[in-house]
Image (tube, rainbow, N blue to C red):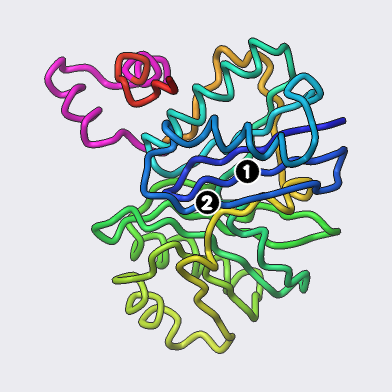
Amino acid sequence: MKSLAVDTSTNALSLALFQDDQLVLDQTYQLSKQHGQTLIPLVNQLIKNAGWSHESIKALYIGRGPGSYTGMRIGATFAKTWAVAKSVQLYSFSSLAAMASQILDHDAQALVLPIMNARRQSVYAGAYTWRDGYLHSMLEEGHFDFECWLKDQLLPLVNGKGYRRIYWVIDQAGDLTPLIHEHLLEWDGTYQIIEGPSALVTLQRLPFLPTSLVSDPNLFVPFYAHESLAEQEWAQKRSVELGASEQESYVEQTDETDLS
């Protein structure tokens, strides 16, 4: 079965084509333009380069985040529109897991930490390890104060499981680096920080990631992890607490998802 994979959760746009579980083509773009301007043309070009037709694609995989609000909204709109219009199966996967998948240390004592810097020392974070050839999540993903996450979640996991190697895969390490050094100062294992272009979301190993079937593509909502500042202000003005349905309602009222 031919499938298309898309991730728009960061400033980079990641695409891949698969025949069953075999990678056919993949490309990651770092572009100055928003994904709304580039996504469809680049998808069309990738399909053309593979010699495929749009109709030959029978499954679509979309990165559900967490990450860039605008990017995820654009990706979600694209995925829902494609899946419904072409009557194909839609699956979602963690964008953080896709980041982590580029580290191929299958040792049971190795831990991979995909981190997206969300500014003000907050992050989107997860923790993964390889087991039996597949990537497995070891901590619940979400949006966290980085130092609190280090102390309350990461260190108990590392010490409890006896990990000896840590790979930090960070889009922008910046002010996070001193906190990493500080909190791992007394840990007797080794760690490596991979950042910048080497830490981009890649889809080459998608067949080895956990994926979820979206039973109704019309109802697909990305994993935002928390409300954006604009959404928080919008909620405060109306004295309402945003739930998943209200978030999606607000998303549909914006023009950020316009793919025309």
Residue beneath the point at 70% across and 28% down? 60
57 magenta-colored = no
Amino acid of disc 1? Leu
Residue beneath the point at 44% across and 62% down? 171
Residue 15 is marked as: 1
Q: Nearer the viewer, residue 52 or 142?
A: 52
Q: Nearer the viewer, residue 193 or 22?
A: 22
Residue 113 is marked as: none
Relative to 160, 184 lies left or right: left
Residue 182 in the image, given as x and y percentages of width and height: 36, 82
Location of the C terminus by quadrant is top left
Q: CA distance from mark 1 to mark 2?
A: 9 Å
Give the structural element (helix, strand or loop) at label 1.
strand
Residue 77 drawn above or below residue 173: above
Residue 96 drawn above or below residue 110: above
Amino acid of disc 2? Tyr
Location of the N terminus by quadrant is top right
Residue beneath the point at 15% across and 15% down? 238
Residue 80 drawn above or below residue 152: above
Q: Residues within 10 Å of mark 1 (few under 14, many from 20)?
A: many
Res 189 → quadrant: bottom right
The answer to whether the residue labelled 1 contacts the one labelled 2, judged by CB atoms less than 8 Å apart, is: yes
Dot placed on the residue nearer the N-terminal end, 1 or 2: 1
Residue beneath the point at 73% across and 68% down? 104
Residue 153 in the image, given as x and y percentages of width and height: 47, 60
The residue tagged 2 is 29
Relative to 65, 112 lies left or right: right
Read off the magenta span. Answer: 225-250
Q: Nearer the viewer, residue 254 or 164?
A: 254
Q: Main secondary structure of the magenta part?
A: helix
Q: Residues within 10 Å of mark 2 (few under 14, many from 20)?
A: some
Give the structural element (helix, strand or loop) at label 2.
strand
